[in-house]
């Protein structure tokens, strides 16, 4: 993984290259649906800080969405270690990111989508 630098985003849907109001209407390549860049660890550190300080303002879930949240977590757990073995691996508590903490506050520990965000 490279160190964070000022780089242009990979996807720039508002740069004029896509028709207006067509963003999100193209099929994704399942092998490239998630990207990892040199900002991964700083982004995760900031998420941890926000989860620790204001979890109720950072993550909100609708009732009845746990199955869908779990589906996202399962997809990420299958994809990330295979696609990005240098940064992600399966551990005892799910997907772990090398060099990053993975603990959630108790109030979020049971939410699959909160787990998926780290």
Image (cartoon, rainbow, N blue to C red):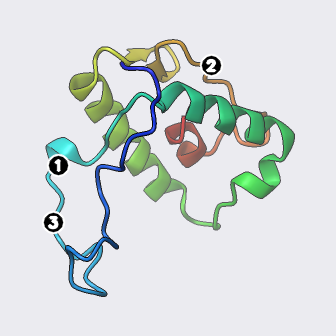
With 53 as the anchor, is 102 left or right in this view? left
Marks 1 and 2, the one that precedes in the sequence: 1
Query: Disc 2 vs disc 3: Cβ atoms closer than 8 Å?
Result: no
14 over 3 or under it: above or below:
below
Residue 103: numbered disc: none
Neighbours of disc 3 within 10 Å: few (<14), some (14-19), many (20+): few
What percent of the width, then of the height, locates residue 109? Answer: 68, 36
Among the 4 quarters of the image, the one containing residue 79: top left
Marks 2 and 3, how far apart at CA:
33 Å
User: Which of 41/57 is in front?
Assistant: 41
**At 47% from the left edge and 20% from the top edge, which residue is drawn?**
97
Query: Disc 3 vs disc 1: Cβ atoms closer than 8 Å?
Result: no
Marks 3 and 1, how far apart at CA:
9 Å
Q: For mark 1, give the secondary structure.
A: helix
What percent of the width, then of the height, locates residue 67? Answer: 47, 55
**At 44% from the left edge and 21% from the top edge, which residue is drawn?**
3
Q: For mark 2, give the secondary structure.
A: loop
**At 31% from the left edge and 14% from the top edge, which residue is drawn?**
86
What percent of the width, then of the height, locates residue 5? Answer: 45, 31
Residue for badge 2: 101
Neighbours of disc 1 within 10 Å: few (<14), some (14-19), many (20+): few
Among the 4 quarters of the image, the one containing residue 118: top right
User: Which of 114/65 is in front?
Assistant: 114
6 over 21 or under it: above or below:
above
Marks 1 and 2, how far apart at CA:
27 Å
Residue for badge 3: 27
Q: For mark 3, give the secondary structure.
A: loop
Residue for badge 1: 30
With 6 as the anchor, is 27 left or right in this view? left
């Amino acid at each position: 993984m490279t160190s964070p630098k000022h780089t242009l985003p990979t996807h720039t849907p508002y740069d004029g290259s896509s028709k207006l109001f067509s963003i999100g209407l193209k099929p994704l390549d399942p092998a490239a649906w998630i990207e990892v860049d040199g900002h991964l660890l700083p982004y995760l550190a900031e998420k941890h800080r926000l989860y620790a300080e204001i979890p109720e303002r950072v993550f909100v879930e609708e009732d009845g969405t746990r199955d869908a949240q779990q589906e996202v977590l399962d997809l990420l757990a299958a994809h990330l270690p295979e696609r990005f073995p240098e940064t992600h691996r399966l551990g005892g508590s799910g997907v772990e990111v090398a060099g990053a903490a993975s603990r959630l506050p108790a109030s979020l520990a049971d939410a699959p989508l909160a787990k998926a965000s780290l």
